[in-house]
């Protein structure tokens, strides 16, 4: 364990205190306390009180700027984040400081105020009285009460700082929390929170819990909750839990989407031996490709990741680490697939040729079934539905729709709203000149697959889930000849229906 502390903080809009090319030489010799903002001064005071000599702060220890030298230093240091936080003695987390100017030691804690109340002791047959002090409950408990997330817990970069640090002191708005890999304790509640956390009562265990000691975590869950729950603590589940929580956080720069999770990726690689492919794991590639957006997505202006990676979209979630809302298919169910695409290779190209460099391109090659599709558009371009393209005239599709009205038709992931079969049939004759032909690429087909929370998104489809699913990607031609870009997720909830479509085997290159 290292003999230093780390700081997890929100920088804020003003960053005049950062280390850059102009002040680097001076800071190599010394840094004046006068030029540091209040949060950093408070962190230094805590570090000294804890008996440590060193404090690692990203805004001070990493060269900032847009020139070549700062960018090179940023890439190098961002690849070392895992070591800085995992090996530190403890992390100081300024939970509710919105900027470095706020500080965290001098916050006025309103609920900590004590109200004096004079109390008569006549009941105990005493003539005198005493004064008692009343204070608000800092840990209210009710079925519908959810403690609000701290400011720090809304930022993307701070997730890996939180999860990787072996122990942390969280300076909240009303009290201090101690959070380590095993438990969480607050000033107002010294009873350890292990499998449950008061700031996430509906969403399961904190992602930090047992992250650096997964074997111990499995044993603990096995003893406390039984073998079935212990199986949920595998590498795959822990990863999707992290991804869903990460998706609910914000980044100042969208180009940081892969970098801000890189330290956690490195740790999972070391623990599992898995191979990482720009947002998915090679050993779990089929399930990893089947991500979806629960809310309307924002497409990045700059290139961040290939279209097949969840990092290519600013997908949102609701801290829903228990239900894995961004991944509708449990990966273990793919093991009994009737058909699985053969994912043969992934070519990753970076600016400097290193795995830690900025991404230029990533090509995923698979041998799989494909069929054509047609998107039918109506009043608004944001509302559409998708039907398979049969080797027949477009007019005959109304008959197909009528026969399949009890079956959920495959639709893209965004938006989640769709028109009913009746509306589709009525408007079918008006779309012949406005059709867009795309390709459906099959990833897996199994009788065990069902869409997570399917009844919430597609009413009256719960019974159909028992027939299994064929999970596919909706793709369109890329800019480079022979390549395709992902534009949506498709599910066919009846295996026999899916098998009846005119599939053909092809080699598909996704970019």
Image (tube, rainbow, N blue to C red):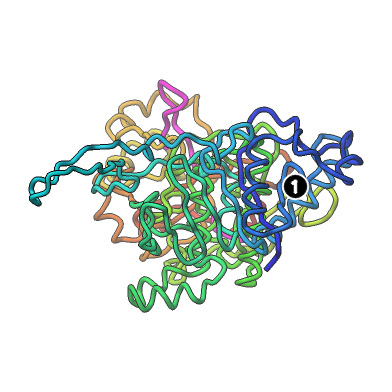
Residue 409 can be seen in this image: yes
* 203 or 45: nearer the viewer: 45
Instruction: Please determine whether, in this image, residue 254 is positioned above or below residue 198.
Output: above
Residue 278 can be seen in this image: no
Residue assigned mark 1: 359
Magenta span: predominant SS is strand
The extreme top residue here reads 379
Circle 1: element type: strand
Give the residue drawn at x 45%, y 27%: 382
Picture quarter containing residue 91?
bottom right
The extreme right residue here reads 25
Q: Tell me which segment is drawn in magenta.
A: 365-385
Give the residue drawn at x 46%, y 39%: 173
Picture quarter containing residue 162?
bottom right
The image position of residue 300, as x and y in percent, is 63, 34
Q: Is residue 408 left or right of residue 473?
A: left
Packing grade of label 1 (10 A; few <14, some 14-19, many >=20) is many
Instruction: Please determine whether, in this image, residue 368 is positioned above or below residue 146.
Output: below
* 378 or 220: nearer the viewer: 220
The image position of residue 355, as x and y in percent, is 77, 57
The extreme front residue here reads 127
State how many labels appear: 1
* Residue 368 magenta-highlighted: yes
Q: Is residue 128 left or right of residue 140?
A: left
The image position of residue 368, as x and y in percent, is 57, 59
Assign the N terminus to one quadrant of the image.
bottom right
* 157 or 405: nearer the viewer: 157
Give the residue drawn at x 69%, y 62%: 345
Picture quarter containing residue 9?
top right
The image position of residue 313, as x and y in percent, is 58, 40
* 386 or 489: nearer the viewer: 489
* Residue 55 magenta-highlighted: no
């Amino acid at each position: 364990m290292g003999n230093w502390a780390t700081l997890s903080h929100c920088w804020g809009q003003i960053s005049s205190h950062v280390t850059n090319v102009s002040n680097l030489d001076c800071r190599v010799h010394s840094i004046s306390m006068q030029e540091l903002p209040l949060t950093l001064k408070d962190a230094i005071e805590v570090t000294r009180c804890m008996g440590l000599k060193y404090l690692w702060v990203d805004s001070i220890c990493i060269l900032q700027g847009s020139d070549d030298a700062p960018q090179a230093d940023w890439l190098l240091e961002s690849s070392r984040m895992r070591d800085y936080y995992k090996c530190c003695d403890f992390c100081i987390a300024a939970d509710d400081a919105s900027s470095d100017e706020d500080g965290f030691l001098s916050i006025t804690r309103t609920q900590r105020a004590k109200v004096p109340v004079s109390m008569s002791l006549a009941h105990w047959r005493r003539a005198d009285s005493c004064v008692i002090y009343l204070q608000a409950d800092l840990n209210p408990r009710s079925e519908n009460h959810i403690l609000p997330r701290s400011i720090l817990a809304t930022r993307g970069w701070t997730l890996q700082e939180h999860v990787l640090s072996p122990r942390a002191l969280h300076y909240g708005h009303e009290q201090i929390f101690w959070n380590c890999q095993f438990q969480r304790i607050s000033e107002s509640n010294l009873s350890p929170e292990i499998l449950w956390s008061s700031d996430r009562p509906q969403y399961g265990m904190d992602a930090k819990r047992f992250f650096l000691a997964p074997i111990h975590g499995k044993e603990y869950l096995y003893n406390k909750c039984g073998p079935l729950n212990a199986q949920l603590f595998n590498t795959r589940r822990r990863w999707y839990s992290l991804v869903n929580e990460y998706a609910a956080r914000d980044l100042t720069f969208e180009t940081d989407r892969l970098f801000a999770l890189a330290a956690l990726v490195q740790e999972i690689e070391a623990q599992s031996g898995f191979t990482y492919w720009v947002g998915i794991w090679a050993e779990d590639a089929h399930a990893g490709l089947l991500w979806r957006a629960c809310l309307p997505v924002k497409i990045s202006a700059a290139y961040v990741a290939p279209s097949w990676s969840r990092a290519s979209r600013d997908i949102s979630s609701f801290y829903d680490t228990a239900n894995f809302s961004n991944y509708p298919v449990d990966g273990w169910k793919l093991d009994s697939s009737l058909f699985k695409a053969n994912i043969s290779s992934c070519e990753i190209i970076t600016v400097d040729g290193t795995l830690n460099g900025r991404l230029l391109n990533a090509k995923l090659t698979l041998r799989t079934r494909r069929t054509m599709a047609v998107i039918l558009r109506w009043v608004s371009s944001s509302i559409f539905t998708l039907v398979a393209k049969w080797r027949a005239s477009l007019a005959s599709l109304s008959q197909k729709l009528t026969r399949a009205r009890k079956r959920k038709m495959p639709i893209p992931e965004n938006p989640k709203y769709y028109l009913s079969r009746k509306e589709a049939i009525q408007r079918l004759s008006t779309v012949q000149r406005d059709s867009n032909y795309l390709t459906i690429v099959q990833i897996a087909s199994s009788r065990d697959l069902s869409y997570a929370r399917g009844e919430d998104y597609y009413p009256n489809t719960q019974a159909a889930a028992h027939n299994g699913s064929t999970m596919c990607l909706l793709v369109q031609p890329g800019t480079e000849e022979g390549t395709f870009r992902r534009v949506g997720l498709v599910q066919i909830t009846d295996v026999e229906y899916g098998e009846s479509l005119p599939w053909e085997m092809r080699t598909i290159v996704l970019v």
